[in-house]
Image: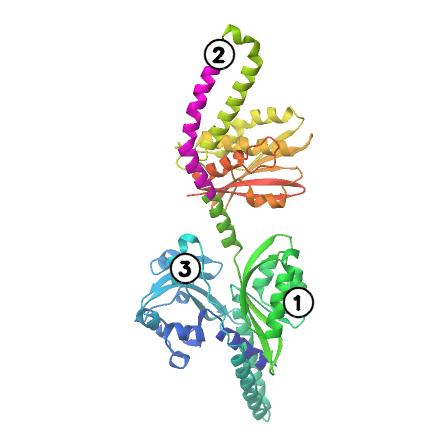
Amino acid sequence: MPTDNHERLLDIIDFLPDATFVVDCSGKVIVWNRAIEEMSGVSREAIIGRGGYTYSVPFYGYSKPGLLDFFGVDEKEIARQYKSVHKKSQTLYAEVFVPQIYQGRGGYLWLTAAPLYDNEGHLAGGIECIRDITDSKRLEEELYQHRHRLENLVQERTRELACANELLQREIHERSCVEETLRGSEKKLKEQVDYLNTLIESMNELFYTYDTNANIVFINYKCWDVLGYQREELLGRNLLEFVPEKNKAEIYSAIQVRLQQGVPGSYETEIIHKNGSSRYVRLNVSPVIKDGRITGGMVLAEDISEQKRVEREMAHLERLRIVGEMAATIGHEVRNPMTSVRGFLQLLGGKADCLKYKEIFDLMLEELDRANGIITDFLSLARNKPVKKVMQNINILVQSLFPLLQADASKDQKNVVLVLDEVPDLLLDAKEMHQLILNLVRNGLEAIPTGGRVVISTAAAYSEVILAVQDDGCGIDPTMLDKLGTPFCTTKDNGTGLGLAVCYSIAARHNACITVDSSPLGTTFAVRFKLS
């Protein structure tokens, strides 16, 4: 019945960990959940039905428009009121400090606001979700973000649902004697269910439920987006189908704990997208209890793939920073005595009584030169290495190197192809760009067989310029992907592992990052330059 769904969806909103409220077209509050009651100190009874921006008083101490009052307003105007504001589709995101919450201690909040529409596409109101990010602000240099855990209120929720269902059934029975009134009530309830369904589908988190066999019963739109499937492809399938083989035993054990013991939990895991790629989510799991019996579980999950990527990138840059400091400290100290040794070897090699050892002297000089080249690469890792950047076009730099690259390739009957789109100028150091391009392309040439090819491409996308080097080799061992760019880590018999490390350092000095996509069909290194 629509009434059951309506009450169920109301309860879901009520137990969301984020403080959430909803207003109608006239600006009156129509939903005020438990989390916002706790954060603001204002009960829903005191604020439901009130307008005039009353909902802002518990946060600011006075009435003022909320983020959900700025739909259709220019972002520059919103930025005057809120920090770090941005818009994605019709959803607004902003950060703000409010002084009144938590008995006047105040705190930083992350706001998400979205418009709500009725079945006919008319604006029906707005929803605003509020998240306390005070602790995250203190720890933002370490890139950790804390999320509120779901409260353990499943037992209370079940009792409230049973009581609410009983009251609704009694009310429907009493109204059944008046057919016209019943039809009106059913229509109204259907509209409310549709409205609450819109709220669930508008959530920025994944929400799904499963039965006692861990088969999916319900999912929201965000699940489709993150996993790449349509709803009908997901319903009825087992949760373990979307988990990597290495994690299945652990996830199975966690599901059984929820189903057997009825305790909530929170953990992070890796999931598999339809295209085979990995995504990372943070799960908050609670059992679903009906008539005193556990009938399944419900999950509120957050996609933290981007956070994980940033953490890996920051860890890699930190390793490069440490190696760079070592390079700057000891590189010159090693090179100076080597220069002296080389000079004496040349001096001795020119003496008549040493001519019979000429081949040995030449070999020693070659090895010293090779060691000197390694030190040169090592010094290139120094973070404070001076660079001379000027506005220039990456396409021109690639084209200037093309004859040299094609000559390298043709020696082994390989080929280099250019696919250069029109891109804006960037602030670049030409010498460092030459070194980066040469390293990436020569790595690609070494990875391909005779007759293979390396494609160098450029493109402008959104707020970045992308330089990509793609080969059709056999790909990189997946176990090595996370180690790429680490100094002295190499898969080559005679490699030093410094070539890619130098590329990562050059990219960092140019406010760029390097991403890698590898499969048995080949590997693509993409250098992504941010546009100022």
Task: Give SS at disc 1.
Answer: loop
Q: Which residue is mark 1?
A: 235
Q: Identify the residue shown where x is 34% and y is 61%.
A: 81
Q: Residue 379 location in percent, x, y?
A: 44, 31
User: Gap in Å between the C-alphas at discs 2 and 1?
Assistant: 80 Å
Query: In this rendering, does residue 510 appear at all?
Result: no
- At label 1, counting other C-alpha atoms closer than 10 Å, the crowd grade (few under 14, some 14-19, many 20 or more) is some
Task: Give SS at disc 2.
Answer: helix
Tell me which label, 2 or 1, sits earlier in the chain.
1
Q: Residue 127 location in percent, x, y?
A: 46, 69
Q: Identify the residue shown where x is 64% and y is 34%.
A: 447
Q: Which residue is mark 3?
A: 136
Numbered range of the magenta stretch: 319-347
Quarter of the image with the C terminus in it: top left
> With respect to residue 202, does 4 lie above or below?
below
Give residue 493's quadrant in the image: top right
- Is the C-beta separation of discs 3 and 2 under 8 Å? no
